[in-house]
Image (tube, rainbow, N blue to C red):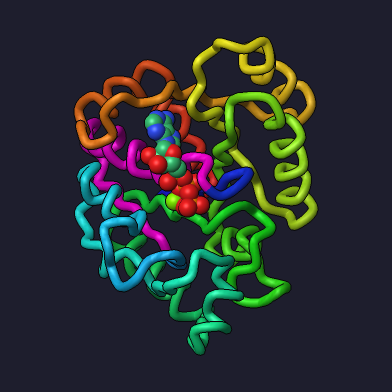
Amino acid sequence: MAGLLVSGTDTGVGKTVITGGLVALFRSTGKDVTAMKPLQTGVSGFSPEADAYFYQQMGSPLSPGQCTTYVMEEPLAPWVAARRQGITLDRQKILDHYSNLAARYTGVLVEGAGGLAVPLLDSQYTTVHLARDLGIPILLVARAGLGTVNHTVLSVEYARQHGVDVIGVILNEYSGHSVAERTNKEVIETMSGLPVLGRVPPLEDLQDRQSVVAVLNSCLDSNYIWQVMNNAA
Ligand SMILES: Nc1ncnc2c1ncn2[C@@H]1O[C@H](COP(=O)(O)OP(=O)(O)OP(=O)(O)O)[C@@H](O)[C@H]1O
Ligand SMILES: [Mg+2]
């Protein structure tokens, strides 16, 4: 069984697009992979804005209700949203949910909420603690352009401080139009010591699974990601 926690340098950097895209890519090569979003905020019930809808569009076999542990209405860090809504978040419930999926699928991609230092269950329990509890490494999704070196290097250092492995970085919505975009891969690799596993361009039609798979196949080495996920297990 292989597991990977897809986190990012920020909210809105493309974690859902990469998570769903990887599910589609892995499944296109015959791997029985699913995605999970343990803590979904900013949606009411399972409205189509929930990240899990995109996983399903990308071929994940689970409904949003089956792959999301908690849903909270306000677009806030889970700990804050839960407190305001009067919800008690149970760590064991999330871990059991993951174990259940891990027993049924050959791979589980877990999407975090926001970035690595976002408080999930309380002020001392962030995304890195979840990755550590699940025993899985992190894949970091980052913006492609100016400002991403700082966010990426700080995120990697934060994970390391907490003893959690980061397998690499994906630079998302890469157009190559600016010097910063063209030089960021080398700068990030040199400074972090981690590989940039792909530079993903803006995808024209996110509803079209086949074209998402084709584009990701051309810019990501999914075999490498699969190997690292399995070796870390
Ligand atoms: N490569 C891409 N091509 C086209 N659109 C993209 C791409 N990556 C992200 N987007 C768009 O950017 C927005 C944010 O992406 P996404 O929802 O994946 O971010 P996120 O990191 O999962 O955010 P959250 O923290 O809310 O979970 C979405 O509207 C998504 O469709
Ligand atoms: Mg998301």
Position of residue 188 in the picture relative to residue 48 (left or right): right
Q: Decide whether residue 28 is among the magenta residues.
A: yes
**Image position, residue 112 (x, y; %):** 51, 56
Residue 86 versus residue 59 in the image, above or below: below
Residue 3 makes an appearance in the image: no
Residue 225 versus residue 53 in the image, above or below: above
Q: Tag count in the figure?
A: 0
Residue that appears at 78% across and 44% down: 157
Residue that appears at 76% across and 21% down: 190
Position of residue 231 in the picture relative to residue 71 (left or right): right
Q: Decide whether residue 54 is among the magenta residues.
A: no
Residue 90 versus residue 43 in the image, above or below: below
Position of residue 54 in the picture relative to residue 195 (left or right): left
Residue 217, picture quadrant: top left
**Image position, residue 105 (x, y; %):** 28, 55
Residue that appears at 34% across and 37% down: 21
**Image position, residue 89 (x, y; %):** 51, 82
Residue 133 makes an appearance in the image: yes
Residue that appears at 27% across and 21% down: 214
Stretch of the chain drawn in magenta:
12-37
Position of residue 162 in the picture relative to residue 218 (left or right): right
**Image position, residue 32 (x, y; %):** 25, 46
Between residues 127 and 44, which one lies in front from this camera angle? 44
Instruction: Give ligand 1's quarter of the image.
Output: top left
